[in-house]
Image: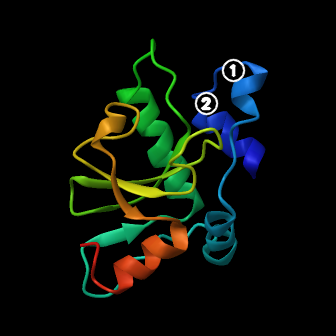
Amino acid sequence: MQKLLFHALSNCKSLPYERRVQFGIPEEYLDYLSTVDNTTIKPVGRDLYIYGLFEALSSTVNYTQHDEDPEYQPVFWLSVGHRSDRGNFFICCDKASELYGQVGEFYDSSPFLFVEDFARVGTGFADFCENVLAGKVY
């Protein structure tokens, strides 16, 4: 699965070896994907969605195609959900970044456009899910 996701997250470009070895999907998110397959989850009573594999890939590729600045090589991010129509959740998959494993919300934005818009909503994927269920992310 890592190879498939790497290809999608690199926007199908050939990246230098040193960039390729930095890519790693956090174990917490891989564990989640193995339990939900392609199903997108919508917690009851919330206008919020947590993606399964298909939607995560589709959404990530969509963001890289529309938001990526070709002169800028961002860290690897994977789209993991959204709330309403403007809050977008991404998990950092770049082991060289201090944000690795963290989930951030990009309001009306994406990390491929403005990484400085990152607002942490989870120190990891499990923490993000706990925050969603506790009503801290809405």
C-alpha separation, residue under disc 2 versus residue under disc 1: 7 Å
Q: Is residue 14 left or right of residue 79?
A: right
Q: Position of residue 36 (x, y in %)?
A: 60, 75
Amino acid type at circle 2 is Ser
Mark on residue 10?
Answer: 2
Neighbour tally class for label 2: few under 14, some 14-19, many 20 plus, Cα within 10 Å: many
Q: Residue furthest top?
A: 71
Q: Please tell me whether mark 2 sits on a helix, a strand or a loop.
A: loop
Give yes or no for contact between labels 2 and 1 (Cβ–Cβ under 8 Å).
yes
Residue designated by label 1 = 15
Above or below, comparing residue 35 to residue 50 in the picture: below
Determine the image quadrant of residue 22: top right
Q: Position of residue 54 (x, y in %)?
A: 56, 56
**What residue is at 45 percent from the left and 12 percent from the top?**
71
Q: Position of residue 132 (x, y in %)?
A: 36, 78
**What residue is at 59 percent from the left and 37 percent from the top?**
9
Q: Residue furthest front?
A: 98
Mark on residue 126?
Answer: none
**What residue is at 26 percent from the left and 80 percent from the top?**
46
